[in-house]
């Protein structure tokens, strides 16, 4: 089955409000509509920029989509500082990253919480971009495939096959994020193929063929083509390189 490539730009906690608007305008200008027939593109700004981006996207009928970097597992209530699925849905978010290694590391998010967030996103019609990935010591000990496999299945626990179709999986080896060290395409494909295999075993090959599996970790315009040439890599979750309009649009055009 041919899956449409998908590039998502994770801005992390970068850019002020005006810079965010300017970046979306530059991306829209440099990536004309014809590209969207070949690649889906999303930006994942900080919460504070989402409303402005919604206004730009809706106002100019842009084909660019957008989403958030996290959501609460709860719909509403006394959860100071959190942002819920219904709030993101109201802002037109198509995607939300869940289980990013920075959330796992700095906010101590475990697989159980990541699973709740995946379910919260799906409940509100937002596609979760579920991040899994091993630390360097796990890879060096040869446990990377098992580690990612177990993070994936733990986060999808309790979902029906129909719901798993909504999930985007991102394999992000922790040692490659923001370090400039990109996994070789062979290493990335090994894990992405194993993750798709795990989906096929548990939810059937039709679902596994449909789910997009991305690679993330120091992706740039210079390495995207080799990565997406792999059978099981359907695009990328891009951090640093998504903050520069020229580099990001080049990368999208090459995907
Ligand atoms: C990320 O944060 O998801 C990421 C992949 O970052 P970078 O591209 O900067 O390594």
Image (cartoon, helix red, strand yellow):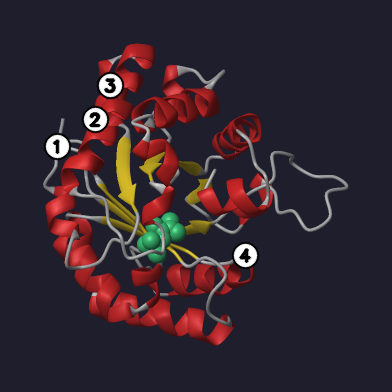
Judge the density around disc 1: few (<14), some (14-19), many (≥20) Cα neighbours within 10 Å: few
Q: Which residue is mark 1?
A: 231
Between discs 4 and 2, the one toward the N terminus: 4
CA distance for labels 4 and 2: 33 Å
First in sequence: mark 1 vs mark 3: 3
Q: Quadrant location of the C terminus?
A: bottom left
Mark 3 close to ligand 1, CB under 8 Å: no
For label 4, count other residues whose C-alpha is less than 10 Å away and answer few (under 14), some (14-19) or many (20+). some
The answer for how far apart the CA atoms under marks 2 and 3 are is 6 Å
Q: Which mark is residue 106?
A: none
Q: Secondary structure at mark 1?
A: loop
Q: Secondary structure at mark 4?
A: helix
| Residue where numbered disc 3 is placed | 197
Q: Residue at x 14, y 37 (%)?
A: 231
Numbered tag placed on residue 47 in the rendering: 4
Looking at marks 4 and 3 on the same chain, the residue that comes earlier in the sequence is marked by 4
Task: Look at the numbered discs 2 and 3 and tell me whether their residues touch, using CB distance below 8 Å.
Answer: yes
Image position of 42 (left or right of 104): left
């Amino acid at each position: 089955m041919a899956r449409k490539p998908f590039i998502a730009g994770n801005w992390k906690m970068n850019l002020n409000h005006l810079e965010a608007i300017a970046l979306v305008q530059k991306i829209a200008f440099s990536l004309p509509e014809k590209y969207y027939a070949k690649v889906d593109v999303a930006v994942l700004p900080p919460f504070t920029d989402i409303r402005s981006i919604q206004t730009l996207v809706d106002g100019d009928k842009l084909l660019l989509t957008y989403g958030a970097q996290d959501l609460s597992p709860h719909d509403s209530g006394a959860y100071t500082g959190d942002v819920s699925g219904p709030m993101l849905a109201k802002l037109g978010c198509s995607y939300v990253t869940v289980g990013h290694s920075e959330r796992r590391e700095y906010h101590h998010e475990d697989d159980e919480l990541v699973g709740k967030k995946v379910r919260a996103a799906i409940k509100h019609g937002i596609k979760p971009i579920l991040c899994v990935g091993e630390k360097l010591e796990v890879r060096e000990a040869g446990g990377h495939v098992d580690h990612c496999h177990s993070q994936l299945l733990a986060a999808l626990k309790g979902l029906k096959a129909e719901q798993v179709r909504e999930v985007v999986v991102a394999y992000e080896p922790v040692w490659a994020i923001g370090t400039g060290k990109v996994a070789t395409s062979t290493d990335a494909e090994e894990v992405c193929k194993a993750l798709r295999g795990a989906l096929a075993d548990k939810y059937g090959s039709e679902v596994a063929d449909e789910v997009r599996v991305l690679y993330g970790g120091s992706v740039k315009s210079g390495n995207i083509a080799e990565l997406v040439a792999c059978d099981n890599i359907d695009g990328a979750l891009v951090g640093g390189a998504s903050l520069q309009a020229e580099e990001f649009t080049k990368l999208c055009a090459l995907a």
